[in-house]
Image: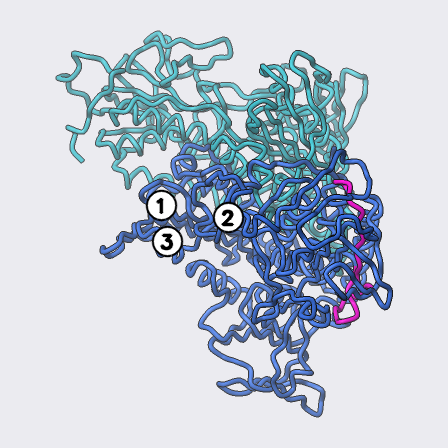
Chain colours: A blue, B cyan
């Protein structure tokens, strides 16, 4: 059926595709390595105890009696629920909904709604819907219009007075949309017959959850409480805001310092810059987006700087001082910059594992507080499972969805399913945005040695007319031996939309020859990926790389 | 590279090895296909000449320009105008995002037109450079075939040059046609539509193909009132019926008046504008009437009859799978052969020709799974089979997955326009055999999907791909259950 639910697009039904979910990948060695089809059963870490023996006779709703004989649960004991999920974000909702569809009785608890998260505030929908992907993207849309107005001038559009932005309209409309979405998520749970309990869940024992004083027993407990922004303790850090607050400011920042070089930092830099704040980004390293392909890092930073964002490289915050006029100064290792209306820290996120009762029941946490789980998302306690950002694996909504879907199958469909982390595509909604799948050049060289690099750095058709200095960068990393595409990167307009289809192709063992034999869609930016004929450089072990210079002009159709 | 690289493939003629020719290859027409073929042939070591008519945005029997339709009168200028027109919708969308845009927004058509002309002149120069950098000799003038190995170029001043060539390649493209109705001279073709002096306030478009819907969107986006007339029930015949209906709905949603199953019968000049009469007895007044009623191959003045090159009924040059005409050393690529009339296809044909004739590697163009896009607003893009084609060709059951959703941007902008996506899957093999989408960024999104089809992607592989969130494209990897299953041998849907 058509998924006609409005954004975010919720899949309302599901089917299993066991073949691929069973693909084995132990430590995500190379995201693009050949799938090895192995019986997933033989690779369970604790075969004797962790394999749930299901005796589901039908998918219709009934309490799953003998769902588990190996998790310490008494199979004759009555539990209030087959599954109790703590946290109704992307992962928790997906797991609960699927579990209920598979016949389990499910409850999920979530904190009361607020746009700003805390120990006592959250909301159905979680980070993605309320404090992450969705509001972020809405603000990106809003800020991008500024660039479009500029572009439109080059295309003949004139405004009697320059378009002005009204902050409160945007925030009000954004919040109305978030309210609508949290309502949709509640309905999704309700329609799936999942019991929603508002309140703070805490684990009392391996089969009991306490929600604000009321106890619920459950055969399985799923922890999907996500993560929260983390602000390091420096003098004056109480004046700093995090991304939660930055998404819901009452007024527009006149001049904002953003501390951090990760994707959240560059996304907010783009948002505030587009909405005409004076934006300064302070990064500890030489450049933004550590872990991304080096060329992409250089490119995006250069493009952002061209749009007016000021970068302060290798500059770490030491203190924030509030002046008499209310403005903030940021002291760094290099000096002091004054006059900020806002200072935002985008300095990482931490799993929400405090005060959940985890340590007491024996759930193991990693050093950064993340819940340690096996490949099936099971914790050290056999009846307790965890998915999503709280496990700090790959912190992306679609990955949490995958983990949630997998756990529901493992527990209630008699289909032990490991999430498959190979070739997970991702995007950064900077301006211009980045889309990528697979390895960076640096990772590819390390893992494969001999690789061919194809790059294209061109001025898109729109920019030739708008006259703006926008450019687009694309990169392919190809294994010299097998011709397989190991990595694909793009920074430029529409990158996230463009890369999705290529990510499917990568799952289908994309080779450079496949790219060469595909016809372009003309005129698009995306067609450039199928018209890269000669490598920019060939990297060979023991040999210096051979380089050619980039062609500068994207001649129409690359004739 | 020296001439000794000129190793002819099996498709070449014997006994010619010793003959001397001015050129190894002479190409008539320097559009996408001709330039590509020349350049690649020259790279293989061939001595190449190419002729092209003088440059002007509006083509005629004696006007053309290096770059051809795509660069001068097609893809490129069209896309520039589509970009320009898209801002109209963007300005509307911006308001609910907090942007206060003065009601008085002015669109300066002349400025955009100048920018467009500057850009196509720039690209015309780029193409000339491409040729000279490859060592291809460019002649300006009209080329005619005077013998199996002889070409005559009539230059601007009327002087004629004659050259012999071992191979001749015809890549003269096509031109817009006009319907034979009274007053047709008052109408314009897409050539002129891309170069109008004034932006029309009231535009009438006749035709249901991609050119018609693209220009309807362009003018509407720039603020004109647009009436679109076409013969069928829905525009874009040949595309997936369900998506055709989506396009029609979106065009209407953006304010274009659709007149299905209606033809124009007469144009009359009046003081107020052009009076347009339809076969339903309606009358309306327009500033501009665009005929987007098809294109025909440019074969009339090539003197093909002199050497006996065969044409089909439409006037297109008949070629074999290697783009060879019935005259063994005369070849043809691109729109003049009326196969799949797309720039990237002409490029592919040009490359295959060069490989076949000068690369020692006989190569047939591969017409399977060619993606394409219609740049109406919002755009449509497809690859592989439509649902109707899949049903017709199917040996087993077909699964159809569809998704209709409100793109995130619209949740705040308030625009009432759904994005629709569709995957067609062979139930037995699980292979995805067709994909289509109508919605913002469809053309950009479809390129990667086209690659996936080229890789033989199965639905399971689509499903196992993690989404990029939040994007529209991720919907292609989250279509979990089939909308319908079409059992082999049944045809539940009507053909429109």
* Chain name for mark 1: A
* Chain name for mark 3: A
Mark 1–mark 3 Cα distance, whole angstroms, equals 10 Å
Please indicate, yes or no, whether residue A280 appears anywhere in the rendered image. Answer: yes
Q: What span is colored magenta in the figure? A: A101-123
Please determine whether, in this image, residue B247 is positioned above or below residue A252. above
Mark 1–mark 2 Cα distance, whole angstroms, equals 16 Å
Q: Choose the circle earlier in sequence order: 1 or 2.
A: 2
Relative to A469, A125 lies left or right: right
Residue topped by disc 3: A447
Relative to A306, B357 lies left or right: left
Q: Are marks 1 and 3 in contact (CB under 8 Å)?
A: no
SS for tag 1?
Answer: strand
Residue topped by disc 1: A479
Residue topped by disc 2: A422
Relative to A422, B35 lies left or right: left
Instruction: Return the x and y of residue B416 as percentages of the image width and height.
Output: 78, 43
SS for tag 3?
Answer: helix
- Residue beneath the point at 18% across and 29% down: B5
Relative to A487, B1 lies left or right: left
Q: Nearer the viewer, residue B484 or A363?
A: A363
């Amino acid at each position: 059926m058509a998924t006609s639910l409005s954004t975010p697009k919720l899949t309302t039904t599901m089917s299993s595709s066991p073949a691929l979910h069973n693909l084995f990948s132990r430590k995500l060695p190379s995201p693009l390595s050949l799938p090895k089809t192995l019986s997933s059963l033989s690779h369970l870490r604790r075969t004797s105890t962790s394999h749930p023996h299901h005796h589901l006779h039908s998918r219709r709703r009934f309490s799953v009696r003998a769902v588990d004989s190996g998790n310490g649960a008494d199979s004759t004991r009555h539990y209030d629920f087959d599954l109790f999920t703590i946290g109704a974000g992307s992962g928790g909702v997906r797991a609960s909904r699927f579990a209920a569809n598979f016949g389990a009785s499910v409850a999920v608890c979530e904190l009361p709604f607020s746009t700003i998260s805390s120990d006592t505030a959250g909301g159905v929908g979680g980070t993605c819907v309320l404090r992450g992907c969705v509001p972020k993207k809405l603000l990106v849309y809003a800020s991008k219009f500024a660039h479009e107005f500029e572009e439109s001038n080059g295309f003949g559009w004139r405004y009697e007075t320059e378009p002005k932005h009204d902050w409160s309209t945007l925030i009000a409309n954004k919040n109305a949309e978030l309210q609508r979405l949290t309502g949709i998520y509640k309905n999704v749970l309700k329609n799936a017959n999942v019991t929603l309990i508002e309140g703070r869940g805490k684990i009392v024992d391996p089969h009991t959850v306490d929600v604000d004083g009321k106890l619920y027993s459950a055969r399985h407990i799923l922890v999907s409480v996500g993560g929260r922004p983390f602000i390091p303790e420096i003098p004056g850090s109480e004046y700093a805001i995090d991304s939660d607050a930055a998404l819901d400011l009452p007024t527009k920042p006149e001049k904002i310092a953003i501390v951090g070089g990760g994707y959240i930092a560059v996304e907010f830099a783009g948002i505030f810059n587009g909405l005409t704040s004076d934006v300064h980004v302070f990064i500890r390293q030489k450049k933004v987006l550590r872990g991304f392909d080096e060329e992409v890092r250089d490119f995006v930073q250069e493009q952002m700087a061209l749009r007016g964002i000021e970068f302060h490289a290798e500059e770490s915050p030491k203190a924030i001082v509030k002046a008499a006029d209310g403005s903030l100064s940021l002291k760094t290792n290099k000096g002091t910059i004054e006059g900020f209306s806002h200072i935002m820290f985008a300095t990482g996120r931490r799993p929400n594992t405090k005060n959940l009762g985890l340590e007491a029941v024996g759930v193991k946490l990693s050093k950064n507080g993340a819940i340690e789980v096996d490949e099936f998302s099971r914790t050290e306690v056999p009846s307790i499972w965890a998915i999503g950002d709280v496990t700090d694996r790959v912190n992306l909504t679609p990955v949490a969805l995958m983990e949630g879907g997998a756990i529901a199958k493992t527990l209630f469909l008699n289909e032990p399913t490991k999430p498959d982390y190979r070739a997970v595509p991702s995007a950064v909604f900077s301006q211009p945005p980045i889309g990528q799948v697979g390895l960076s050049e640096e990772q590819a060289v390390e893992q494969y040695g001999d690789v061919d690099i194809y790059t294209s750095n061109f001025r898109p058709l729109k920019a030739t007319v708008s006259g703006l200095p926008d450019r687009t960068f694309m990169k392919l990393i190809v294994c010299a031996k097998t011709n397989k595409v190991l990595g694909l990167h793009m920074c430029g307009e529409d990158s996230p939309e463009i890369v999705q289809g290529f990510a499917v192709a990568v799952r289908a063992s994309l080779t450079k020859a496949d790219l060469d034999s595909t016809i372009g869609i003309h005129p698009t930016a995306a067609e450039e990926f199928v018209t890269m004929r000669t490598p920019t450089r060939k990297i060979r072990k023991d040999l210096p790389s051979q380089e050619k210079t980039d062609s500068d002009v994207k001649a129409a159709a690359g004739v | 590279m020296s001439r000794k690289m000129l190793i002819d493939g099996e498709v070449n003629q014997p006994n010619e090895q010793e003959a001397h020719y001015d050129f190894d290859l002479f190409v008539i027409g320097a559009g996408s296909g001709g330039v590509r073929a020349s350049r690649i042939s020259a790279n293989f070591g061939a001595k190449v000449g190419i002729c092209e008519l003088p440059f002007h945005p509006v083509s005629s029997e004696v006007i053309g320009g290096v770059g051809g339709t795509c660069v001068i009168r097609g893809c490129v200028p069209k896309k520039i105008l589509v970009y320009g027109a898209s801002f109209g919708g963007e300005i509307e969308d911006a308001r609910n995002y907090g942007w206060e845009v003065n009601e008085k927004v002015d669109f300066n058509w002349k400025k955009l037109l100048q920018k467009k002309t500057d850009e196509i002149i720039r690209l015309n120069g780029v193409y000339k450079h491409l040729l000279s950098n490859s060592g291809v000799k460019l002649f300006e003038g009209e080329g005619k075939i005077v013998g199996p190995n002889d070409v005559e170029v009539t230059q601007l001043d009327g002087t004629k040059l004659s050259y012999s060539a071992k191979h001749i390649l015809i890549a003269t493209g096509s031109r817009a046609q006009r319907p034979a109705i009274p007053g047709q001279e008052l109408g314009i073709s897409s050539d002129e539509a891309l170069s109008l002096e004034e932006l029309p306030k009231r535009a009438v478009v006749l035709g249901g193909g991609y050119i018609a819907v693209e220009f309807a969107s362009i003018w509407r986006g720039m603020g004109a009132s647009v009436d679109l007339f076409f013969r069928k029930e829905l525009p874009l015949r040949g595309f997936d019926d369900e998506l055709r209906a989506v396009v029609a709905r979106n065009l209407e949603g953006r304010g274009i008046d659709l007149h299905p199953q209606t033809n124009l019968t007469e144009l009359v000049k009046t003081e107020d504008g052009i009076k347009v009469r339809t076969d339903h007895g309606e009358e309306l007044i327009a500033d501009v009437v665009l005929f987007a009623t098809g294109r025909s191959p440019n074969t009339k003045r090539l003197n093909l009859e002199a050497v006996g090159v065969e044409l089909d009924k439409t006037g297109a040059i008949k070629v074999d799978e290697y783009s060879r005409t019935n005259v063994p050393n005369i070849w043809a690529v691109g729109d003049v052969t009326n196969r799949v009339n797309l720039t990237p296809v002409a490029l592919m044909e040009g490359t295959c020709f060069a490989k076949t004739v000068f690369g020692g590697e006989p190569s047939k163009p591969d017409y399977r799974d060619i993606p394409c896009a219609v740049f109406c607003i919002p755009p449509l893009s497809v690859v592989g089979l439509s649902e109707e084609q899949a049903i017709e060709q199917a040996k087993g059951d077909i699964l159809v997955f569809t998704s209709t959703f409100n793109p995130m941007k619209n949740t705040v902008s308030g625009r009432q326009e759904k994005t629709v996506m569709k995957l067609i899957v062979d139930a037995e093999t699980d292979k995805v055999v067709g994909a289509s989408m109508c919605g913002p960024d469809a053309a950009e999104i479809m390129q990667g999907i086209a690659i996936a089809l080229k890789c033989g992607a199965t639905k399971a592989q689509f499903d196992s791909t993690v989404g990029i969130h939040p994007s529209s494209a991720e919907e292609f990897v989250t279509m979990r259950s089939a909308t319908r299953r079409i059992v082999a041998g049944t045809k539940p849907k009507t053909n429109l």
